[in-house]
Image (cartoon, rainbow, N blue to C red):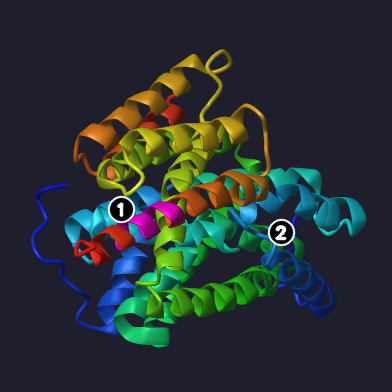
Amino acid sequence: MSVPAWSWSPEVWWTLFGHFLALSLMSIGGAITLVPDMHRRLVQDSALLSDADFTGAIALAQAAPGPNVLFVALMGWYAGGLGGAVVSMVGIMLPSTTLALAVSRWVSVRRHWLGVRAFQAGMTPVTVGLLLATGWHLMPPLDGQPRAWGLAVAVALLVWRTRIRLIWLVLAGAALGALGVV
Amino acid sequence: MADTPALARPASLRELFIAFTLLALQGFGGVIAVAQRELCERRRWLDAREFVDMLASAQVLPGPNVCNLSLMIGDRFFGWRGALTALAGMILAPMALMLLLAWGLGEASSLPHAQGLIRGALGGIAAVAAGQIIGTVLKLSAPLREHELGWPACLGLAALALALVVHWRWPLVQVLLSLGAAACLVSYALLKRQAARQAGPQA
């Protein structure tokens, strides 16, 4: 279904670039929060991607190393080859990166302002809850895949309480998954 | 945490780039867990409280939180060049690897057996990734014990944020604008009272 890696398709690239550029500044909480929007734009409205490629991109990026936002590069890859991957990543990152850098500089100069300190103090516990919610959503379902669920819980305890190298846990998970244990 | 020897810093842009590349390549299913390990515990560029404070700002801004976090850390050590270097380290190598993987999976589509193995392995990794995030967040909650708002209030805020998203399915922006804003206002009042108390013992 997907196009060849070296496909030359500037019109597709422009379309991808425009969509991701427009979505970038809305991606509060990460690009993953925009998945419904992306589905509407790329699959339903413009048919740049098949449904299977769309979900496949998210699943693969979730498991592969690196920030989860790389699923955007994969969508670009499936729709427009290597060029599509690059323009999609630039589109999603450029506006948010510029804003984040500007704001964080503004804040770090004013680190001792009461307002800035209050903002960080107030947001920190809320962030902890929001990150827990992210982990919660990624948990395998307890009734559908009880063994995968148990693996996730065991990993959570190990990461919290020990200093075990994370890569061993990943390798163990991959092995158990490939053998069909979880 | 009591065990905090003096913090270190990267010696060069090159070291910064390599550090972020290595940590991104170890971050299966998300980078927060590895970032916390590498930056706070192994390299000691940040302490746990700074990490969670930066993560809070990174979370509120648009863009992936770990990418915003790398921008902030890079900027802090080497200005805008550091910011771009850290971000490039976070993205370039994992992106190349991921495209290679996608290409390989496409090639392997004629081999159903290999496909099954790979899908199984990816499923196992996804379960581990979920556990890693939860374990890391539990670890990150440790500095909240010395938080200005107090430990019980922090626990309550975190639990409420979790419940709003998971149980009541609020969009993240709505949680930030209501619960987040309220927490900031209370912190502001509290810090202001503290400052007034410190300023005026002579009264």
Around disc 2, counting alpha carbons within 10 Å, would you say few (fewer than 14), some (14 to 19), or many (20 or more)?
many
The nearer-to-camera label among 2 and 1 is 1
Under mark 1, the amino acid is Gln
Q: Quadrant of the C terminus of chain A?
A: top left
Say whether residue A159 is left or right of residue A36.
Answer: left
At x 43%, y 39%, the residue is B129
Q: From which residue to which does the magenta span run? A: B189-195
Q: Which mark is residue B36?
A: 1
Place of residue A73 in the rendered image (x, y in percent of width and height, measured from the top left): 62, 63
Relative horizontal placement of residue B108, taking residue A50 as reference (left or right) = left
Q: Quadrant of residue A92?
A: bottom right
Residue drawn at x 26%, y 41% is: B145
* Residue at position x 38%, y 25% in the image: A153
The amino acid beneath tag 2 is: Tyr
> Gap between marks 2 and 1, in whole Å?
32 Å
Give the vertical position of A34 relative to A180 (above or below).
Answer: below
Q: Is residue B57 above or below residue B8?
A: above
Task: Name the residue: 69% across, 58% down.
Answer: A75
